[in-house]
Amino acid sequence: MLSRRVKMLGVGADIGVTVALQVLGSLVAFLFQMLVLRALSKDDSGIYFLVNSYVTIASGLGDFGLAAVLTPRLSVARGEATPAFKVAVHIRIAALLLSWILLNLYLVIIGQESLLLLTNAAYIWVLLSSRATGLRQLYEILWRLRGRTYVITAITMIDATIGLVGLYLVYRFGHVTTLEALFISSICNLPGFIVVMIPIISRLRASGVMRVRIPRRFYTGMVMASLPVGLMGFLGQVSGQLETLVIGMSRTMTSSDISAFNAATKPLIATLFIAVAVSYGVVPIIAQSMKGVRNDHSFAFIVSLTFRILGVIGLGGAVVAILFAREIMSIFGPQFIGDAYILKMYSLVSALVYLVVMFDQFLLAIGRRKQTLYGAMLYLGIALVTELFAVRSWGIAGLIFAKTFATFCMLAFQASRFGPEIRMAVLKATVRLLPSIGVMAAALLLTGEMGLIPRSLIVILSTTGAVLLSRAVTVAELVTLKSMRIR
């Protein structure tokens, strides 16, 4: 069987190979989205993204936080299925069925019956994809706990490649419709679903764990343990799709506006794995520091350094997005070049989101899960109210300003959840970044009438010089970070 043929790797090697494959997979997924935008009209691609937003939110409801609760229990069992796995499978099936019913009812209630066929075709993705929260996600946990995360990541990348090739063939030799694009993005995950599921199902049958009778109280206990995590995940899914939904609900906007917004934000959203990787990489150091296992570097120093590193990376991304916005948008087709202003404006939001991701990871690392949930609720409430008002009055530009305001509010809330020492470290880190931000802004404003090449050279060189001269991040600090080891 495949699970016996592939090699079990150590934790470090498994993570390293997995990250490399995830980068390739993200590139393939981005190329798929790019092809969708080029193959469909602006209106049709807007419908495509709106449907995906509905389905993504429904998948958040189907998730129910089960993976987070099940993984530690299976870890103790050394990666072997236990009765808890059977309970999780049954709850996941019920949650998926409920989310599917509610999704269809919602579309009927809001008068979007025309999207029912498209939405149900897209919902197949939830059931089959490794990136969604269907049954496959639970079975993949058993692969991960046996040192084979790289295998399922490779299978996921192959699924995405199959989808990309399939969509390209239809685009090259026929005419792509919205239904075909959604169906291809869903059904391309079937080969991987089969490859992942069959070996595990065989093991489960041999173990007999799925035939064990489970008392009702175990189901209740699993539901109650999963509920807080599931709620936070659901709020996260809604927040991630909020702008698409707000544009879709606005009477002054069209599906073309949905397409324009998604085309402009996809390149920036695709870089969020950087913030996740950097933040997650120092989480074990923070956890050890807080528990007194180590005292070589203070929590305040680690927060300050990580804050400034992500700030500089976000600043660099904003520079590239602002300078080359028209060129970046042209890869989606000439009809999107006029929407380059969205990419420029959203680049600043993206830099702030890097810091939101960092604070979320750090709050979780020190055990403040409720504060993370409260922050997600605060952000969603502020963003929903302000974006609905702003999009009606000022269009997509107003929407982005409202999102920026909500993100600032969330950052302020997150920082306030730490002690005075950490808040002071964040303030000092911000002060060290301000000169670089000011130089970048001034360079962009003063070179607005120049050609692309001279303007790019002046802005990039001046911003880089400001980062170095202001010591936003020093070489010595980077060397220190590299020398940190988990004890």
Image: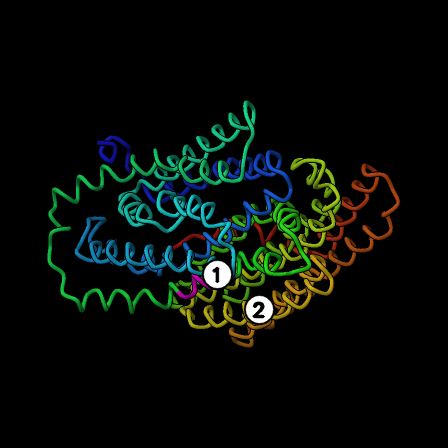
Q: Tell me the amino acid under the disc marked 1.
A: Gly
Q: Nearer the viewer, mark 2 or mark 1?
A: 1
Q: Nearer the viewer, residue 137 or 23?
A: 137
Q: Is residue 456 left or right of residue 423?
A: right
Residue marked by disc 2: 410
Residue at 46%, 67% (x, y): give it: 363
Q: Residues within 10 Å of mark 1 (few under 14, many from 20)?
A: some
Residue shown at 36%/43% (left/top)?
128
- Count of all numbered marks drawn on residues in the image: 2
Describe the element under mark 2 as helix, strand or loop: helix
Above or below 234: residue 338? above
Q: Amino acid at mark 2?
A: Met
Residue 159 screen position, x and y as percent: 41, 34
Residue 32 against residue 432 in the figure, above or below: above
Name the colouring of the figure: rainbow
Q: Residue 341 in the image: x percent, y percent?
A: 74, 50
Say which mark, if any, is on residue 245. Answer: none
Q: Quadrant of the N terminus?
A: top left
As helix, strand or loop, the secondary structure at mark 1 comes to helix
Q: Which residues are magenta?
A: 231-238
